[in-house]
Image (cartoon, coloured by chain):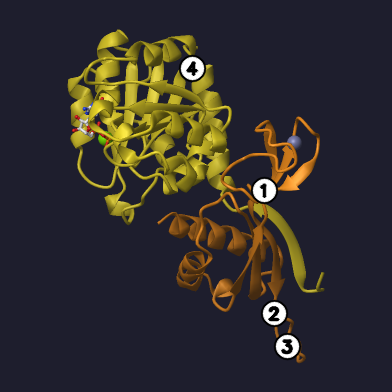
Chain colours: A yellow, B orange
Amino acid sequence: MEKNEVKVMQKILRVNEAIAEELRKDLADKGVFYMNLMSSPGSGKTTLLENTAPKMSGNLAVIEGDIQTTLDAERVAKAGIKAYQINTGPFGGDCHLESSWVKAALQEIDLTGIDYLFVENIGNLVCPAEFDVGAHTNVLLISTTEGEDKPLKYPLAFRVSKLCVITKTDLIPHLDIDMDLLRSNIHKVNPDMKIIELSAKTGEGFDNWIDFLRKNKR
Amino acid sequence: MHEGAIAQALVNAAHNVAVENGSKPVEKVLIVVGKMHQIVPSVLETYFDMMKEDFHLLSNAKLVYTEQELLIFCKDCNTESILETYPIFMCPKCESFSTEVVQGEELYIESLIFYKEEPDGKE
Ligand SMILES: Nc1nc2c(ncn2[C@@H]2O[C@H](COP(=O)(O)OP(=O)(O)O)[C@@H](O)[C@H]2O)c(=O)[nH]1
Ligand SMILES: [Mg+2]
Ligand SMILES: [Zn+2]
């Protein structure tokens, strides 16, 4: 080591990580199960939430992350979910959410009586995977229209998530997707990943998702 | 891109370290990035060079980037290997998927190197 060198050994994202840890603990103490939904744009995150609400007796809250618009917050609010929108546009159009923004959003949301908190992250499989938002579980959504290779192309998103929800199974008859190959690619990247396959349109497989939520109720 | 947010966190942290260590101008910022991160070094460097301008102690600093290989430990054959099949997390020795990452997830500042002081003792 050079004389004018100082050892640092400090995580670059340690500020984000410290706030994430604080949120994780705080929400667990409040009895809230907190999930971070990540996917490409259009995989069906908002639709999943809209369809979850009627089956869960009104105790959900959602923080919506989008670069622009409050459309998703309006959609989930219509479904009876307590919703808060974060727009990253004014902050340079960031492609992901950070823990400090979730923390600020939570100051605006009354969590009394809430059992489940969701963050709908910005649609993109690269950037959100790099930032811990403090969720108890990261949930990755991939729709049947996205192709079998996505786990191999975006490994970090699959590694940092515990549950993969494969959406739009109603479309399988119209597609060439090889579901066995998709499942096998998911498990090659993350052997422990739990997979739930469902269609928000027909309701097929949706019970497995609701079961997952019920089992994780704090 | 996420490289922008990472560069911002990096310059903030590097500046704090420089201040804690006598507020001398920084020549190099050495960072270590595990292969798991999807960071493009040249993009990170571009953002770093843009954002360092906000801190006079960093304005002549160069980013030195070291990528860390992915190492996995296999719980079936108890051996450590370089994961050459990345992103497929399989033990190259016994083909087991029961592995854990022992290296390759890091993202940290290793050290700062300050400019040597001028011979005339200027601070
Ligand atoms: N056929 C079908 N379409 C779906 C399903 N889930 C979502 N979609 C459609 O996919 C589009 C994008 O969904 P959205 O929830 O906005 O995706 P997000 O960007 O991930 O929030 C919308 O047109 C949805 O109606 C599904 O299970 N089946
Ligand atoms: Mg949406
Ligand atoms: Zn092995």
Image quadrant assignment for residue A168 = top left
Distance between the Cα atoms at labels 1 and 3? 46 Å
Distance between the Cα atoms at labels 4 and 3? 57 Å
Q: Position of residue A52 (x, y in %)?
A: 30, 17
Mark 4: which amino acid?
A: Lys
Q: Which residue bears the numbered disc 3?
A: B118
Chain holding disc 3: B
Chain holding disc 1: B
- The residue shown at (48%, 44%) is A152
Q: Which residue bears the numbered disc 1?
A: B83
Front label number (4 vs 1): 1
Chain holding disc 2: B
Q: Which residue bears the numbered disc 2?
A: B115
Front label number (2 vs 1): 1
Chain holding disc 4: A
Tell me the SS state at disc 2: loop
Mark 1: which amino acid?
A: Leu
Q: Residues within 10 Å of mark 2 (few under 14, many from 20)?
A: some
Tell me the SS state at disc 3: loop
